Amino acid sequence: MSHPNSPVGILDSGIGGFSVVKQVQRLLPEEELLYFGDGAHIPYGNHPEERIAALARYMFRFMEEREVKALLVACNTISCLLDRWEDTAACPVFSAVQAGADAVSGLEVDKVGVISTVFTHRAGIYPQKILAQSPRKLVVLSCGCPDLARLVEHSLGDPARMVRVEEELRRELGPMVLEDEVDCCVLGCTHYPLVADRIRRLYPDLLLIDPAEEMARALEAHLDREGLRAAREGPGSLTVYTTGDVAEYALRARQVGLERVAGVEHYPPMAL
Ligand code: DGL
């Protein structure tokens, strides 16, 4: 039974979900947040489906044991699997891909680009959902980036490494913007909004869609509907768990500008 002061869970293969944490902290500062980043197994986007599903279930169990009142799957790659699962979790689950598609449905655009991991691209769920939901006749182009999430994960704040990120952005996103001339681009991997400033510098006229904003709004609407908004004196804190490097996660949390970080703790990775 969910309680208003139960935490909200947010998970990703790595630090990408910090882009979602940021939006949730902005919109719902009173909520207590638990974050799980599976740093030991990133990048998920290059794994086969069975492995992604097993790794995701491991994180779902972690969150269920902590009795979260809602779970934000801040990983587009995992979100692609949610519609195929008969059971997901004991609490309401929010999908990054659904949020991205919802965000597009309100726009007056004709040609939509989606950049994502290779798995998300091949799954084809983004074009499917965007086309099914749009009242307009749209063209949706999708591009899978094999290395961009991993590069972002380990490059924030390091100018030399960020040069690699920019090269990768030019190679993967460039053709969609300069040749196909998309009207907007969905950042279909939660790592990419963490380098949105770089993307804006490269392509200043491109409208960027960050599903994180829509995810935070969907969570807010759900909590209001169910009477589950946290009722505590003062703002809630954030505890980060990772199967990866604790010091690196603490640094990334600061770089991304996350607030009220109560702790960054190690959690044993699922054995493969
Ligand atoms: N951040 C994740 C996503 O949104 C995946 C990155 C990865 O592990 O490949 O898809």
Image (spheres, helix red, strand yellow):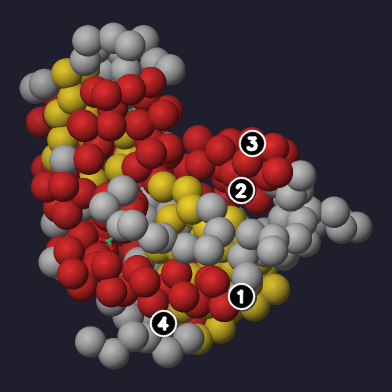
Q: CA distance from mark 1 to mark 2?
A: 19 Å
Query: Pointer 4: what residue?
Result: 243
The answer to the question of whether label 3 and label 2 lie on touching residues, with beta carbons closer than 8 A, is: no
Q: Is residue 215 above or below residue 233?
A: above
Q: Quadrant of residue 3?
A: bottom right
Q: CA distance from mark 4 to mark 3?
A: 31 Å
Question: What kind of residue is marked 2?
Answer: Val
Instruction: Nearest to the eye among marks 4 and 3: give it.
Output: 3
Dot 2 alpha-carbon crowd within 10 angstroms: few under 14, some 14 to 19, many 20 or more: many
Sequence-earlier tag: 1 or 2 = 2
Is residue 244 toward the left or the right of residue 220 in the image? Answer: left
Dot 3 alpha-carbon crowd within 10 angstroms: few under 14, some 14 to 19, many 20 or more: few
The answer to the question of whether label 2 and label 4 lie on touching residues, with beta carbons closer than 8 A, is: no
Residue 13 in view of the camera = yes
Query: Pointer 1: what residue?
Result: 66
Q: Secondary structure at mark 4?
A: loop
Q: Quadrant of residue 196?
A: top left
